[in-house]
Image (cartoon, rainbow, N blue to C red):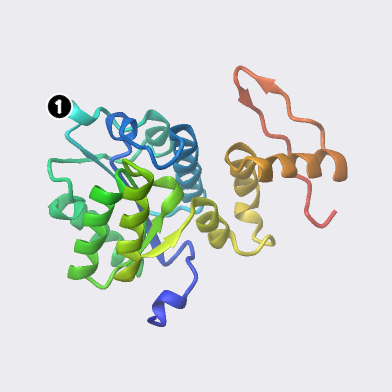
Amino acid sequence: MSNSALKLLTPRNCQVIFIDQQPQMAFGVQSIDRQSLKNNVIGLAKAAKAFDIPTTITSVESASFSGNTIPELLEVFPENKTLERTSMNSWDDQNVRDALAEHAKNGRKKIVVSGLWTEVCNLSFSLSCMKDTDYEIYMVADASGGTSVEAHQYAMERMIQVGVIPTTWQQVMLEWQRDWARKDTYDAVMDIVREHSGAYGMGVDYAYTMVHKAPARVAFGGSIGPNPVPNVDD
């Protein structure tokens, strides 16, 4: 394994690409519960936003087949232009290659990938990208999905065999955070954890209210309003 691959992900050495997070693509996913998939995709997106990670969003055949990119993802990145294409392989598209290259100029050669489907769009992008460049691919397995458990599994195994690094969305976010003393992103990470990390998030809420004696959060208008986060040193 190369020395570069041994380096942890940081907010300065990587970028993110979301490939074809569109409804028709999600309809075909059978490798993961689709609501869990959506939760993980948006959790990863919010984490990328919180750490100011350059992010590329691609879509394929939106008008004729796949539908528009899921709105929750676009809401996280209202300033981003979605790169529409026709090829199943994002790497075939010059606009996608240019966007990734622009971010890579600043040393961001670790590309964190979340996409649909694992065995088609993710695999073809990863293999082509690694063949043509010195970029490293980090495949977010639980923010991607295939048309069957086997399709996802064997695509992941095939990619791993050629050097793609498997990961999960929460692992990526916590690798970016790394140190709880980093107060500039601490509150944002805790908000993402409470909203998207299931039992871990419930545990955070419990610790805040029962240990740190923070006031309970109150649901209003279908959303949860954050309270000031206690200092972890209290």
On the image, the x and y values in percent for residue 138 come to 39, 61
Residue assigned mark 1: 64
On the image, the x and y values in percent for residue 44 come to 47, 47
Disc 1 crowd rating (10 Å Cα; few below 14, some 14-19, many 20+) is few
In this view, the residue in front, 1 or 62, is: 1
Q: Residue furthest top?
A: 221
Identify the secondary structure beneath mark 1.
helix
On the image, the x and y values in percent for residue 74 come to 37, 34
* Amino acid carrying mark 1 in the image: Ser
Q: Residue furthest front?
A: 150
**Residue at horizontal 60 percent and vertical 43 percent from the top:** 197
Asked whether the viewer can see residue 231, the reply is: yes
Query: Is 166 on the left-hand or right-hand side of 80?
Result: right
On the image, the x and y values in percent for residue 222 come to 60, 19
Res 213 quadrant in image: top right
Query: Is 232 on the left-hand or right-hand side of 132?
Result: right
Q: On screen, 233 above or below 8?
A: above
Asked whether the viewer can see residue 56, the reply is: no
**Residue at horizontal 65 percent and vertical 64 percent from the top:** 179
Q: On screen, 157 above or below 59?
A: below
Q: On screen, 7 above or below 178?
A: below
In the rendered picture of this protein, how many numbered marks are placed on residues?
1
Query: Is 187 on the left-hand or right-hand side of 15?
Result: right
**Residue at horizontal 64 percent and vertical 52 percent from the top:** 186
Instruction: Give the position of the N terminus as an image quadrant.
Output: bottom left
